[in-house]
Amino acid sequence: MLAATLLLFVLATAAIVFPKAFLCVDNGPAKADVIIVLGGAAWERPEYAAELFKEHAAPEIIVSGAGDNQIARLILLKDGVPPDAIRMESKSRTTSENARYSIEMMRQDKMHSAIIVTSWYHSRRALKCFEHYAPELQFFSWPAMFESTHWQWMHKEEIKRVYLEYLKLPGYWVRYGVSPF
């Protein structure tokens, strides 16, 4: 019992000190049918999606999420993405819904692969949601990241989001059956 408690303490401490090692999934360069940029962050997600589009990672972008998706669209347009390459998914309010509604659009257009662009701390849960709802499709995670040392995140607004992510991972496992592993 003492050994299990000590192991749990060491894992929890490591997760707090090295959150990118636990939360971030970055599959690296890939080509896909579409880039899916998830709502929920101000500007870094659509800006990164625009960069990937310009590098020909995919010919289309789906902006997923109710509320801030119009802002993301404007950022994409400002960054040079043509309007006819941007599709809007405006119903989703959660990561689970982002996945389900975006996958529905992909299936309608007979797409087989997607690059998911979200924040680094959200990338594990987002990727796992997409894989859970469409195991027959291929998904790549390319999270939008700030260039920083691993300690700098603690001095930013992200700290709250990082800690909430640690709660959301098991919550999604219980509620939707989306395993974080």
Image (tube, grey):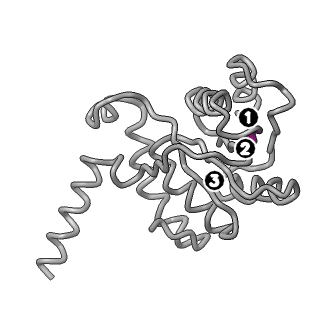
First in residue order: circle 2 vs circle 3: 2
Q: Residues within 10 Å of mark 3 (few under 14, many from 20)?
A: many
Which residue is depicted at the point 11% across and 78% down?
2
Q: Is residue 177 left or right of residue 18?
A: right
Give the CA distance from mark 2 to mark 3.
9 Å
* Cα–Cα span, label 1 and label 2: 7 Å
Residue 166, x across and y down, in percent:
41, 56
Residue farthest top in this picture: 78
| Position of residue 1 measured from the top left corner of the image (x, y, whole percent) | 15, 82
Q: CA distance from mark 1 to mark 3?
A: 14 Å
In the rendering, which numbered label is found on residue 9? none
Q: Secondary structure at mark 2?
A: strand
Residue that carries the numbered disc 3 in the rendered image: 95
**Image: 180 above or below 140:** below
- Magenta span includes 64: yes
- Image check: 81 left or right of 110? left
Q: Which residues are magenta?
A: 60-66
Q: Which mark is residue 64?
A: 2
In magenta stretch: residue 138: no
Among the 4 quarters of the image, the one containing residue 148: top left
Q: CB atoms at circles 1 and 2 under 8 Å apart?
A: yes
Amino acid type, label 3 = Thr
SS at mark 3?
helix
The circle drawn on residue 69 is 1
